[in-house]
Amino acid sequence: MLAIGVDIEDISRFKNKKPEFLERIFTKQELDYCFKNKYPERHLAARFCAKEAVIKALSGLYQKTLPLKQIEILKNKNSAPYVNIQIEELQKYKIHLSISHEKEKAIAFVTVE
Ligand SMILES: CC(C)(COP(=O)(O)OP(=O)(O)OC[C@H]1O[C@@H](n2cnc3c(N)ncnc32)[C@H](O)[C@@H]1OP(=O)(O)O)[C@@H](O)C(=O)NCCC(=O)NCCS
């Protein structure tokens, strides 16, 4: 079985946001990574897309609400992003993620096996 999800966002939505807003959506590790970069909003938008794409891909497999903060986007040693899902019953699925961003838009694509 293969499920897919995709999401695209305007990067401007994530510029100069209050910490309270960001901390509702992103984990500390995610925020640390984004704010290490020159344009944090690009990385924030990309991670938001990734979380939404995961929700879309899992929507046929999981009927409960999936809090955005429990879908954590981390990086491996090659800098490739991966999903650390903090909900035990979803850890049996293999989730693949690819993200991209430029000046105005960010996009993420997810598959679930
Ligand atoms: C990886 C690469 C294709 C990214 O392309 P890009 O046009 O610079 O950037 P994009 O906006 O399309 O994508 C950026 C995202 O790609 C992802 N990415 C970075 N390295 C990656 C990799 N090795 N594999 C998969 N995804 C990767 C990241 O998630 C990054 O976003 P983030 O910094 O917010 O996490 C490019 O940096 C490249 O060709 N690098 C040379 C090869 C390399 O460095 N490999 C890694 C070490 S083996």
Image: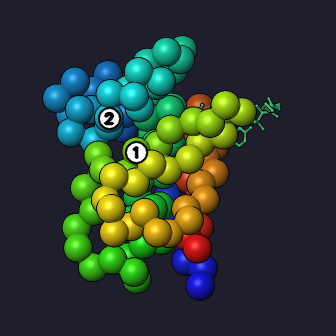
Front-most of residues 84 and 68: 84
Q: Which residue sits at x=53%, y=17%?
A: 37
Residue 56: percent from left, percent from top: 43, 70
Q: Which residue sits at x=23%, y=32%?
A: 23
Residue 63: percent from left, percent from top: 27, 79
Q: Are dots 1 and 2 in contact, CB under 8 Å?
A: yes
Disc tally is: 2
Q: Is residue 41 left or right of residue 21?
A: right
Q: Which residue is at the far left?
A: 20
Instruction: Tell me the residue that label 1 is attached to.
Output: 72
Using the rendered image of the protein, determine whether residue 91 is visible from the camera's viewpoint: yes
Q: Quadrant of the N terminus?
A: bottom right
Front-most of residues 32 and 101: 32
Instruction: Tell me the residue that label 2 is attached to.
Output: 27
Q: Quadrant of residue 26?
A: top left
Residue 15: percent from left, percent from top: 37, 27
* Amino acid, disc 1: Glu
Instruction: Report how far apart the C-alphas of labels 1 and 2 lie in the structure.
Output: 7 Å
Q: Is residue 110 left or right of residue 62?
A: right
Q: Which residue sits at x=55%, y=62%?
A: 95
* Amino acid, disc 2: Thr
Q: Which residue sits at x=60%, y=79%?
A: 2
Residue 66: percent from left, percent from top: 27, 62
Crowd class of label 2 (few under 14; some 14 to 19; many from 20; radius 10 Å): some
Where disc 1 sits, the SS reads strand
Where disc 2 sits, the SS reads loop
Q: Is residue 78 left or right of residue 4?
A: right
Front-most of residues 46 and 89: 89
Q: Quadrant of residue 24?
A: top left
Of the four image quadrants, the one with ligand 1 is top right
Q: Is residue 110 above or below residue 10?
A: below
